[in-house]
Amino acid sequence: MMLAIIGSFSTSPAEAAPSNYKFDFGNGEVEKGYIGVSANDKYDVKKRYGFNTPENMINVPASGASLGSDAVEFLKFGTKSDNTFNVDLPNGLYEVKVTLGDTARASVVAEGVYQVINMTGNNATDSFQIPVTDGQLNLLITEGKVGTRFTLSALEIDKLSHHPETNRTIYIGGDSTVCNYYPLDSSIQAGWGQLLPKFVDPETFQVKNMASGGQIARGFLYDGQMEAILKYIKPRDYFILQLGINDTNPKNTTTEAQFKEYMREMVQQVKAKGATPILSTPQGRATDFNTEGVHSSVNRWYRNSIIALAQEENVPLVDLNVLSSAYFTSIGPAASLALYMNGDTLHPNRAGATVLARIVAEELKRQGLDGFTGEDKKNQ
């Protein structure tokens, strides 16, 4: 009789699973408050976590301190790989923080799609929101650059909501002038997408920057980044898309007509999800000044096709090319050059990326899109 009573109050494994975890990976000393996980720890239904195929994992040292002093390395990888770290979780919305080990460039994949693109530098850290709908999180570190190591030092998981849907999100697609650089809060080089959260109301939106260096429209559409956005994007979300710089490089064999249609396909895919696509033109080079001190780059990087596409598809446009030129003209050649990396007239430094992000936010606020402040919310 006693057994029957106990059994009647038992809960299923999914219901009993904790909603918060802190994992320290590798075979070194385990940081206080964390669960130690070695490369040979296979998923166990009683523990509710572990590697799906530990035979494809090894323990490796790392050059950081405490959590970053050791890691596990993924020997098998790819967005659809089954070589994942699995954690049983009650369905809901989670904040996941990852700390890599020693790696030159690596991306984070969960639920079969990219979550973070191209984390760079040893012990890089980033976080993302993810809905869990099947009772388990499946995560791995995969290639951002062929020939480099893909390692994981620490993982923190915190439940945000019982409702398995991301908060309103601004997704960003783009190239090296837009993407994230690490450490996120102190990198010398930065993309404007990395700094856009400064000018967005955090009570309204989270920002998910899926841009990557060297990217072209065809690559963003077909190589996994757009797939990841379409998996989660929903009505009232935004998708800001800025490409064209690398598409004009002859090595990428993309005609302007092809570029426009790749961009159109992404715009229409986002529309079909009920979200709002926003097109942006790339800013010019720091040296695009004429002899009269006027900055202009209106004929660069397929800008005219981007403008035409925005009109044809009736979507918002940020003509960052012209807006940034007006700003550069107002401050002059020397001050403009100071907003770019040393010896580089194309890639903004952190100050330059901040200026560009502010211009983007101010323009979208002017057009009546909600959530953009035009003010640095993080320093208020």
Image (spheres, rainbow, N blue to C red):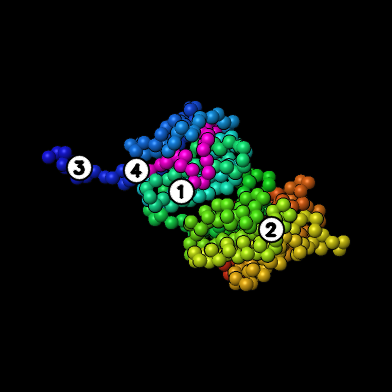
Q: CA distance from mark 1 to mark 4?
A: 19 Å
Disc 2 marks a residue whose amino acid type is: Thr
Q: Earlier in the sequence, mark 2 or mark 1?
A: 1
The residue that mark 2 highlights is 254
Quadrant in which the N terminus is drawn: top left
Q: Earlier in the sequence, mark 4 or mark 3?
A: 3
The residue that mark 1 highlights is 111
Disc 1 marks a residue whose amino acid type is: Glu
Disc 4 marks a residue whose amino acid type is: Ala
Q: CA distance from mark 2 to mark 1?
A: 31 Å
Question: Which numbered disc covers residue 17?
Answer: 4
Task: Say above or below: 268 vs 130.
Answer: below
Q: Earlier in the sequence, mark 3 or mark 2?
A: 3
The residue that mark 3 highlights is 7
Q: Earlier in the sequence, mark 4 or mark 2?
A: 4
Whether label 2 touches label 1, CB < 8 Å = no
Q: CA distance from mark 3 to mark 1?
A: 33 Å
Residue 84: tell me if it is visible: yes
For the point 20% across and 42% down, which residue is it? Answer: 7
The residue nearer to you, when weighing 372 against 254, is: 254
Whether label 4 touches label 3, CB < 8 Å = no
